[in-house]
Amino acid sequence: MFLPPQPVYPGHAKFKGWPAVLLLGAVLLFFTALTVTSPASAAGEERIAVIYPDIGEPYREIFTKIIEGVEDKLGARVASHPVRADTDIRVLKASLLRQNTRVVIALGRQGMKAAAALGNGIGVVVGGVLTVPESEARGQPVISLSPDPALLFARMKALMPATKRVLVVYDPAVNGWLMKLAREAARAQGLELVAHEAQDLRSAVMLYQEIFSAANGHSDVLWLPQDSTTVEERSVLPLVLQESWNKNIAVFSSNASHARRGVLFSLYPDNVALGKSLAGLAQDILASGDYGTRGMLPLRDVQSVVNLRTAKHLGFNPANQQGFDTTLPEQ
């Protein structure tokens, strides 16, 4: 019968006659090797954790996909802490510190609120929020759910090369930061951004009426940002969709659900890719000890959806509709 070789360890017969100092050295080397190769020790040096809202579907699935992306980027499981409005922050912080957490990725408003209450000593990266006040965002990087205007405008320009102006109605309290980026993005595409401010529903409706009375369907397009004031779902959106259809004005949106309602196309989050980007920011903080980029950042990890019925109505070349991740009606 074949017998496997027996392990050699201090006290084995082969060690008899060794000087005591050599035996001690062998023991120290043995346990040092165990310590160096221990995964728990390596993972415990610097940890990244995730804080996310403890809510039901379909939102839980979104956060699950973002966490999946975080773990893909890090190549390891991460400690994930669901939080609610009544979560005891002292207990949460004690748990994070026991896990040697250096940076937390805070998802959603509830996650961001909990992370802000942790105090100093733990870095914070935020994702999965639409917008936050500038005073709250300036302390750490915050990746918004609003797609980067540069990506939106490039997609629109590819579909409709004759576009010259992008028209938009926005609430400066919600999307003032985004319009700064939009102006730069429009300039880079050779477009003129015509941005109208509206701080209430009535003003927004009046501005849309003015836009549709003067817009040129060959060179003007309308952009709908994620803005509950100026793109109100029950009254404003139906008005915009009806007028744009009647006057053949192309409308694109930062909200994916609008494509199903009738806008030409939308961009929406690629949640796994977003998780990877958030993990990358967290790794940068660990590596440098500094945040680097702070404040609101637009979403660049996106997928796209096009409404083929609207595209046909507007007379777009089907070849220009290639490259979208989703088409509606679903085929």
Image (cartoon, rainbow, N blue to C red):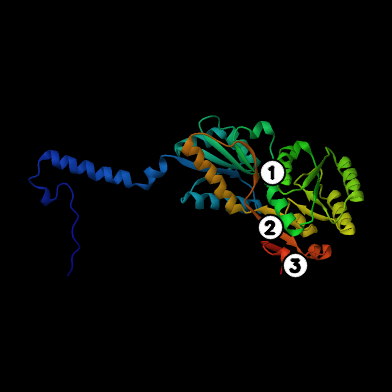
Residue 101: in sight, yes or no? no
Residue farthest left in this picture: 17
Q: Residues within 10 Å of mark 3 (few under 14, many from 20)?
A: few
Q: Is residue 90 above or below residue 181?
A: above
Q: Residues within 10 Å of mark 1 (few under 14, many from 20)?
A: many
> Which image quadrant for residue 175?
top right
Q: Position of residue 222 (x, y in %)?
A: 81, 51
- Residue labelled with disc 3: 318
Nearer the camera: disc 2 or disc 3: 3
Q: Left or right: where does residue 12 sit relative to residue 53?
A: left
Nearer the camera: disc 3 or disc 1: 3
Q: Is residue 108 above or below residue 311?
A: above
> Which image quadrant for residue 115?
top right
Residue drawn at the location 75% of the way across and 39% of the way down:
174
Q: Position of residue 297 (x, y in %)?
A: 64, 41
Nearer the camera: disc 2 or disc 1: 2
User: How many numbered marks appear?
Assistant: 3
- Residue labelled with disc 2: 304
- Residue labelled with disc 1: 130
Q: Position of residue 274 (x, y in %)?
A: 59, 49
Q: Is residue 181 above or below residue 319?
A: above
Give amino acid for label 1.
Leu
